[in-house]
Image (cartoon, rainbow, N blue to C red):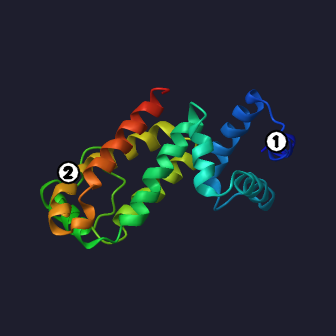
Amino acid sequence: MDLKLVDTFTAGRLDADGEARLADQVARILPLHWTAPEEIVRLTQRIIDHLGGERELLAWLERHPGRPRLVARLYVLIGLLDQISDAAALVAGLAKLREKVRYPPGLGGYLLPDTTAETLADLSAKIEELLADDRAADAFGLAVAAVAMLQEIAPGAARSDPEFGALGDVLEQIRHDLVGAAAGQ
């Protein structure tokens, strides 16, 4: 990450071109947060602090087309997968789906063999790993496949647990946003 860009950005003096370059750098580094050198972590944290938090960081990335926007939208799905991973209604729905289709389209080689409360969180980790390996197109493909699988089980989960009543709509918005980001929108 370019220290001069970070310094200029956090001082509020970075022009639009510099900000776009910095957003691209952050989008490439963000998935490496677990393994990044301490100096990179500190620089990233300076940007997060300047923007006001992690949610604001994703909103900032969202404003930059290309990889930054795609990464921001992938992190929305990653967060959702982590949040709902241990929900009994979804785990049961996923297990039922996998009785019919062991590996839904696009998920072979990614889904854990057994359906557990960790299955969706593991998918989120795999999306992030693909981003870390500079395989954004593969991360996008896995994300869209994960959304499609969840859209299939969402109605049953909503019947079992009213908390998931809006999940289908949320997933459709995420799918739409991901496709738009991949298309440069």
Classify residue 163 as left or right of residue 8: left
SS category of the residue bearing label 1: loop
Task: From the viewer's side, name the closer residue of 168 and 52.
Answer: 52
- Vertical side of 49 occupied by 12: above or below: above
Q: Quadrant of residue 16?
A: top right
SS category of the residue bearing label 2: helix
Q: Position of residue 83 (x, y in %)?
A: 41, 65
**Among the two numbered marks 2 and 1 on one chain, the one whose residue lies closer to the N terminus:** 1
Pointer 2: what residue?
152
Kind of residue sitting beneath label 1: Gly
Count the numbered circles shown. Answer: 2
Q: Position of residue 141 (x, y in %)?
A: 39, 40
Q: Which mark is residue 56?
A: none
CA separation in Å, label 2 and label 1: 45 Å
What's the residue at 85%, 41% (across, down)?
A: 8
Assess disc 1: are there few (<14), some (14-19) or many (≥20) residues with their C-alpha within 10 Å of its C-alpha: few
Classify residue 115 as left or right of residue 30: left
Q: Position of residue 38 (x, y in %)?
A: 78, 62
What's the residue at 62%, 43% (across, down)?
A: 60
Task: From the viewer's side, name the closer residue of 138 and 30.
Answer: 30
> Mark 2 and 1 residues: CB-CB less than 8 Å, in contact?
no
The residue furthest left is 100
What's the residue at 17%, 56% (across, down)?
A: 155
Q: Nearer the viewer, mark 2 or mark 1?
A: 1
Quadrant for the N terminus in the image: top right
Kind of residue sitting beneath label 2: Glu
Q: Which mark is residue 12?
A: 1
Classify residue 67 as left or right of residue 79: right
Classify residue 124 as left or right of residue 148: right
What's the residue at 35%, 41% (across, down)?
A: 175
